[in-house]
Image (cartoon, helix red, strand yellow):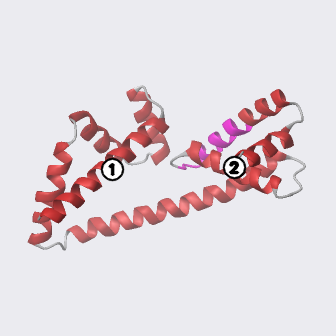
Amino acid sequence: MGPEDEDFARFLEALSPDEDEGGRRYISIHKRLVGFFSVRGVSDPEKAADEVIKRAGGRIRGGADVPDVEKYCLGIARNVAREEWRRERREKERFIRFIQGLAHHTAEEVEKIEHVFKPCFEQLEDEDRELLVAYCQIPGGQSHAEHRLLLAERMGKTVRSIRTRVSRLRDKLAACVEERSKSR
């Protein structure tokens, strides 16, 4: 049993000495945390909820006195939400700088994008290209979480499965771009 498994076991014990009751309370808390993060516009509420449970379990195993586990988790959730907002803000700022920088690219850089990135993107299956475009084009007024939830519903998939697929596609693109860059 690894440290994370031990943390989770201690977390369940803190919820209730009865295993079944502990499991039910865990599910309830996890759902509440997902709702908490969704309402606050965190782009991946499931992952954030998992992080809260992981942190709470680690602190409980470390000896933290936790009379009310649910309130304790909500306190951790507030911190995790702030961390996610800061991370997402940094990502948006980097993206904005990248877009602004495109206007200052030389013809050589534009040609590199045209001859390196575009062919890699076009090598993807039509369905994969459409998913990447849909995933990255967030309509104004929608949060990342809301957009991705609607996309998942439209596709009949879970947000997690779409995020995993997009991550794999980005890795595939990055590998192709790197390979084509070396050969130029």
Which secondary structure class fits the magenta region best? helix
Residue at 27% from the left image edge and 51% from the top image edge: 173
Residue 39, position as x, y percentages in the image: 59, 44
Q: Which residues are magenta?
A: 29-42
Real-space Cα distance between discs 2 and 1?
29 Å
Numbered label attached to residue 15: none
Where on the picture, by quarter, is residue 131?
top left
**Of the two numbered discs 2 and 1 in the rendering, the one whose residue sits closer to the viewer:** 2
Judge whether 116 appears above or below 154 on screen.
below
Left or right, residue 84 beside residue 75: left
State the SS at label 2: helix
Q: Looking at numbered disc 2 in the image, what kind of residue is underneath it?
A: Glu
Left or right, residue 32 beside residue 138: right
Residue 33 inside the magenta-drawn segment? yes
Residue 153, position as x, y percentages in the image: 44, 29
Judge by depth and name the residue closer to the eye, 56 or 80. 56
Labelled pair 2, 1 in contact (Cβ < 8 Å): no
Disc 1 target residue: 170
Disc 2 target residue: 4
- Spot the residue most to the front: 1
Quadrant containing the C terminus is: bottom left
Left or right, residue 87 beside residue 1: left
Residue 124, position as x, y percentages in the image: 22, 41
Residue 139 visible? The answer is no
Left or right, residue 16 beside residue 55: right
Among numbered discs 2 and 1, the one appearing first in the sequence: 2
Where on the picture, by quarter, is residue 84?
bottom right
Judge whether 10 appears above or below 109 on screen.
above
